[in-house]
Image (cartoon, rainbow, N blue to C red):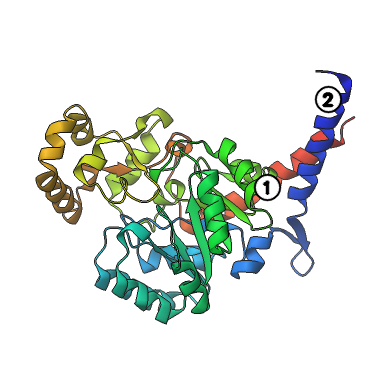
Amino acid sequence: MSESSCLRQAALLEQYVARALAYVSSEAQEGTVMLRTPLCDLLGIGVPIILAPMGSATSPEFAAAASNEGALGSIGSLNRASAAVMRDIDTVRDLTNRNFAVNHIPPMLDADTFRHTLAARPAVISFALGDPGDLVQQAQDAGSKVMVQVTTVAQAIEAAERGADVVIAQGAEAGGYGGVVSTMVLLPQVVDAVSPIPVVAAGGIFDGRGLAAALMLGAVGANLGTRFLASNEAPIDEQWKQAIVAARSEDAMKMDVFNEIQPLPGTAGYGTVLRSLRTPFLEEWSANREEARRERDRLWREIQAKARAGRRHETLLTAGQTAGGITDVLSVAEIIRRLVAEAEDTLSRGSDITAKK
């Protein structure tokens, strides 16, 4: 690389570090350092962290725990009964006076649940796994900000054209349903494509270093799922949490067979595939996809029955590749505090690097 190229790269690095460092500000009253980005002002939250909505792991207590610590808690709706989602929306208001989000999946939208959400007027309504179309305008007309999670640049542009207030760029490392492009590749492209709409990073983030990296790439916050699954408040069985703690990143696999068992939402909308830790159930049926397709109704009933019995870990352990970096089960509050402290420290060290000539 020529000297001029090196200088240009160094100048760009300084620019990115300066932009990210602008989000770290001193709080005069308490003498502490706080991480605050434009996302905080837009959504009315204290820190630029979002608890990802997960239909298989959602509760008002879980969402409130995140919101009460200054993050944005979320209520998930995927594969849930309408009455349960409505109950969660009503209950979470009794547990927190801070903002939260309600998530909907366009390819599987339940009209009654969405109407209830609009009537509740949460601070944020989010959409994932498919084009929300005019649902964006309906949510905004109700007074909510709208986030749309995407897995490609084309989807991000479409979300921007729909009027999304925030775009979440989800990389392929993420747990649950996702695409094929990694976060580090997807995020800066989405930032450029939809500017000045703020972009949140999702997938591959489990600590403050990942949050700092996302800010350096132009994001204004991070949306985390797997890290929060390994929390005291996560409404999942203990075996699932311990499986995440014990897993290696390579244990979190894309499970194409699950779209044979449960075609929606994966085969519709954005066309996504579930990522889960290996289980004997998934490995058995991954080797017999044709039979899994024929037996899909029975297998789906088996998954649901074991989930109700607290034995979901025997069939499906939704988690992202970040599982390999997660070594403990903590409270939601401690996870958020560590994310912020580590991001601040990482960004400070980044400024030291660029200062050296």
Q: Using the image, determine if residue 100 lies above or below residue 204.
A: below
In percent of width and height, residue 225 lies at 44, 50
Apparent side of residue 99 relative to residue 218 in the rendered image (left or right): left
Residue 218 has which mark? 1
Residue nearest the observer in this picture, 266 or 312? 266
Q: Secondary structure at mark 2?
A: helix
Label located before the other in sequence (1 or 2) = 2
The Cα atoms of the two marked residues, 1 and 2, are separated by 21 Å
The residue beneath circle 2 is 6
Apparent side of residue 164 relative to residue 217 in the rendered image (left or right): left
Residue type at tag 1 = Gly
How many circles with numbers are drawn on the protein?
2
The quarter of the displayed image where residue 214 is located: top right
In percent of width and height, residue 122 lies at 47, 75
The quarter of the displayed image where residue 240 is located: top left
Quadrant (top left, top right, bottom left, bottom right) of the N terminus: top right
Residue at image location 35% in from the left, 60% down from the top = 58
Residue at image location 83% in from the left, 25% down from the top = 6
